[in-house]
Amino acid sequence: MASDTLVPIESNPEVMNKFLQKLGVPSNWSIVDVMGLDSEMLSWVPRPTISVMLLFPVSAAYEDHKKKEESEILAKGQEVSSDIFYMKQNVSNACGTVALVHSVANNCDKIQLSDGPMKKFIEEAKPLDAAARGTLFAKTEGIINAHKELAQEGQTNTPSAEEPVDHHFVAFVHKNGALYELDGRKAFPINHGPTTPDNLLEDAAKICKEFMARDPNEVRFTVMALAASN
């Protein structure tokens, strides 16, 4: 049975790419660092870019905004494409892996997944709701075991699963003309308005800047993208 608490996977493109390739993502798609959010820095990111991932500190500002955002959406409603693949995060410290799954699952029309745990999970999870997808993910040993293996790699000392983690990963993807924020800790996907495949990186960067603006004294933000390999 999969563990309810994992050692977090490091925000390291090399480690994340090993993880993705282990699960059947071909090497012509890879995670790259986004070194800055201004237009010049974004121009260095390979295209096409099909997902943007943000790692940020979980702060009081994040929690306050999360509550306010969810209550506003519940009151006003929002349009969410039936094609968006979104799942709840039930496994502690798995947010990096959940963000990677969100990134891949929403781009299966572009990524030629080979047979393996990721492809099998996505196929089995598609007809389920977000909560049931999260439950299935927690029981998908092929993905969980790959996470455990790759969490031992990286540049920093590996923490134990019991150590408190104060960072969280979210993914941003394009689906049917809209930019979606996929955060397994939130009640639902967040529709951030119109975007296109070509503008996903720039539009996601604007939302990342909003995260940073809510925590102006915080510098521990990391942005990465899933993009075509050179």
Image (cartoon, rainbow, N blue to C red):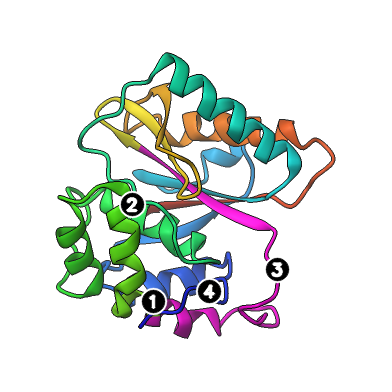
- Viewer-side residue, 142 vs 2: 2
The CA distance from mark 3 to mark 1 is: 19 Å
Nearer to us: label 4 or label 1: 4
Amino acid, disc 3: Pro
**Residue 30 position in % (x across, y down):** 39, 61
Q: Earlier in the sequence, mark 4 or mark 3?
A: 4
Dot 1 or dot 2, earlier in sequence? 2
Q: Residue furthest top?
A: 76
The numbered mark at residue 164 is: 3
Residue 177 drawn in magenta: no
Confirm whether the magenta stretch covers residue 148: yes
Q: Quadrant of the C terminus?
A: bottom left
Q: Secondary structure at mark 2?
A: helix
Pointer 1: what residue? Answer: 144
Cα distance in 3D space between marks 3 and 2: 24 Å
Mark 3 or mark 1: which is in front?
Answer: 3
- Do labels 4 and 1 touch, CB within 8 Å? no
Residue beneath disc 4: 5
Q: Which residue is mark 2?
A: 131
Amino acid at pointer 4:
Thr
Mark toward the viewer: 3 or 2 = 2
Query: What residue is at 33 percent from the left and 52 percent from the top?
Result: 131
- Identify the element where label 4 is drawn: loop
Which of the marked residues, 3 or 2, is nearer the chain's N terminus?
2
